[in-house]
Image (spheres, rainbow, N blue to C red):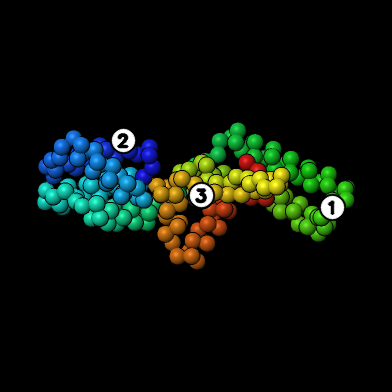
């Protein structure tokens, strides 16, 4: 959970208090609510809700300790992560036209470079790039990302300036704790994770893969 989940968590916590007849003074209630929120912060709000529903059904009227609620919430989080299915959407006609135009722009740029001496790029590499771009097909579907900032990779692209030199860098995305798409991939064995990440990469519009552009 993130700080944005404090209000919906309070509703879950208060409902469970009523269901289990967990009575506290207002001061105790406020302190305990913060304590439970902090303890459960490494799982998603959906997992907290699912575990609270489970406690209400199976708990026989008792209010859980923080460790027990966290254990149940992690069990529910595993279920949510394993059942997550990546979403995709169809490109609109205008989006397909825009992608096709960008593709032609890249091809035109490469054609211009064939008549130039390009420092650091051999003719063989330039020819390979030209061939790769020509094979690009305008996609019909694209991924629907849970987090648009990191595109469900868990990393945000940024820059780092040191000694007057600006270099590309990355930082961890805050969505990692609650993003079901990232958590589903992160929970896989390394070999399986690599395969899934490659499939996700291949589903991104090809020009973005080659040029790194938006």
Residue 108 horizontal side relative to residue 201, left or right: right
Which residue is situated farthest in the top direction here?
94
> Which mark is drawn over residue 172?
3
Whole-Å distance between the Cαs marked 2 and 3?
25 Å
x and y, in percent, of residue 60 in the image: 11, 51
> Which mark is drawn over residue 7?
2
Residue sitting at x 55%, y 39% = 91
Identify the residue position indicated by label 1 in the image: 119
In this rendered view, identify the residue nearer to me: 199 or 72: 72
Are the residues tagged 1 and 3 within 8 Å (C-beta)? no
Residue 106 horizontal side relative to residue 120, left or right: left
Residue sitting at x 33%, y 53% = 77
How dense is the environment of label 2, judged by Cα within 10 Å: few (below 14), some, or many (20 and up)? few
- SS category of the residue bearing label 1: loop
Name the quadrant of the C terminus. top right
Q: Is residue 25 above or below residue 179?
A: above
In this rendered view, identify the residue nearer to me: 172 or 143: 172
How dense is the environment of label 3, judged by Cα within 10 Å: few (below 14), some, or many (20 and up)? few
Mark 1 and mark 2 lie on one chain; the one further toward the N terminus is 2
Residue 109 horizontal side relative to residue 211, left or right: right
- SS category of the residue bearing label 2: helix
Residue 122 horizontal side relative to residue 206, left or right: right
Residue sitting at x 83%, y 44% = 112
Q: Is residue 46 visible?
A: no
């Amino acid at each position: 959970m993130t700080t944005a989940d404090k209000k919906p968590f309070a509703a879950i916590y208060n409902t469970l208090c009523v269901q289990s007849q967990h009575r506290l003074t207002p001061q105790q209630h406020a302190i305990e609510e913060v304590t439970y929120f902090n303890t459960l912060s490494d799982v998603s709000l959906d997992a907290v809700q699912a575990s609270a529903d489970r406690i209400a059904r199976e708990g026989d009227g008792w209010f859980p300790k923080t460790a027990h609620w966290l254990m149940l919430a992690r069990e529910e989080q595993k279920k949510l992560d394993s059942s997550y299915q990546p979403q995709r959407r169809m490109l609109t006609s205008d989006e397909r036209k825009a992608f096709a135009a960008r593709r032609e722009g890249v091809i035109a740029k490469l054609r211009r470079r064939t008549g130039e001496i390009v420092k650091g790029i051999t003719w063989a590499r330039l020819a390979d790039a030209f061939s790769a771009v020509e094979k690009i097909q305008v996609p019909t579907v694209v991924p629907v990302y849970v987090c648009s900032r990191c595109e469900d990779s868990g990393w945000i692209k940024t820059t780092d300036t040191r000694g007057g030199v600006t270099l590309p860098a990355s930082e961890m995305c805050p969505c990692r704790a609650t993003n079901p798409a990232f958590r589903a991939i992160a929970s896989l064995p390394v070999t399986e994770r690599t395969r899934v990440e490659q499939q996700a990469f291949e589903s991104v519009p090809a020009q973005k893969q080659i040029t790194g552009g938006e």
